[in-house]
Amino acid sequence: MAGSTLASPSDEAPALARPPASPGRETWRRFRRHRLALASVGVLALLVGGVVFGGLLWPVAIDDIDFAAQLQGPSWDHPFGTDDLGQDLLARMIYGGRISLAVGFAAMAVASLIGVLVGALAGMSRRLLDPVLMWLTDLFLSLPQLPLLLLVIYLFRDSLKAVFGTQGGVFLMIVAVIGGLRWMPVARLVRAQFLSLREKEFVEAARSQGATTAHLVRRHILPNALGPVIVAASIEVSAAIIAESTLSFLGLGFPPDIPTWGRLLFDAKDHLDVAPHWALFPGGAIFLTVLSINFIGDGLRDALDPRRVL
């Protein structure tokens, strides 16, 4: 039409803004940028799936003895070879992996629970409780962990076996001892987070509206402090697996007839020259598990850090 002019770009309707991503979706987007962490998730999932469902694909008894197949290398009949009694190492690796991974994750849960509780109490306390809890934390940090582990095992192993059975008693003892000696870094981290978050504006606003201390911790402070705790917990899993393997290697963990990965290494130490495969496979499983968990922790640290641009 004559006299009409085109509408300027400013007159056009603004484009619909893209809705902001949820915190979980944003964390996953940032985590995917860490290629080593993403690959480590696949490796860890493969290891966990192998030890959980491997018995269905390889239904061989862990205590079948065949003296005609002693110290054989990997073959079609025995993909991971055999030990000095002719027992299939793949079946023993699958069985032992369940115990080693269960110990790692259970000890991590114990350490994280104690650490979060102690750190939260210390971080929210404004009087005597904070220095007392931090003194206790420093005391546990100064204790030599391996000698203390050995002492506790010597003192309580037989009594726990009598109450919970051989395998159950040793499992509970190792989880409790490892978890009870690994909570200090988590406690110090949670305390630092609480000391910072309790002075933030959103916490002060909730406090001014009459929120109780328990409500502040549960709804405002603890959710915002979980990022570093998750990262620290991922590191505790690998530390617990190494500690259990160390105890089994020293002959102080599970009994000889329970083939954890550490116990397999202990049994293989006298045959390294004639049967190196006996040590390579459990050692490689421990190495891959610990390495993948550490890389996952690195990826979570980067993904949960809002100051890091990814």
Image (cartoon, rainbow, N blue to C red):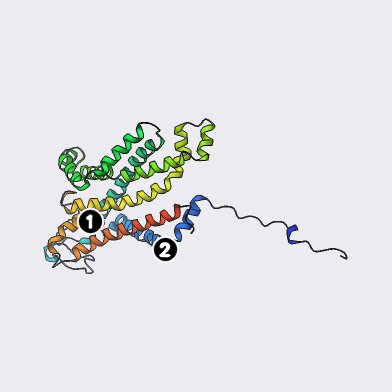
Where residue 10 sits in the image (x, y, percent)?
A: 73, 58
Where residue 103 sits in the image (x, y, percent)?
A: 27, 48
Q: Residue at position x 27%, y 52% from top?
A: 241
**Which image quarter: residue 59?**
bottom left
Q: Which numbered circle lies on residue 261?
A: 1
> Cβ–Cβ below 8 Å for labels 2 and 1?
no
Secondary structure of the residue carrying numbered label 2: helix
Q: Amino acid at mark 1?
A: Trp
Q: Amino acid at mark 2?
A: Arg
> How packed is label 2: few (under 14 Cα within 10 Å), some, or many (20 or more)?
few
Q: Residue at position x 44%, y 33% from top?
A: 214
Where residue 212 sits in the image (x, y, percent)?
A: 47, 31
* Nearer to me, 219 or 208: 208
> How packed is label 1: few (under 14 Cα within 10 Å), some, or many (20 or more)?
many
Secondary structure of the residue carrying numbered label 1: helix
Q: Who comes first in sequence, dot 2 or dot 1?
A: 2
Which residue does the numbered mark 2 point to in the structure image? 35
Cα–Cα span, label 2 and label 1: 28 Å
Where residue 298 sits in the image (x, y, percent)?
A: 38, 56
Q: Residue furthest right?
A: 2
- 5 on left or right of 274: right
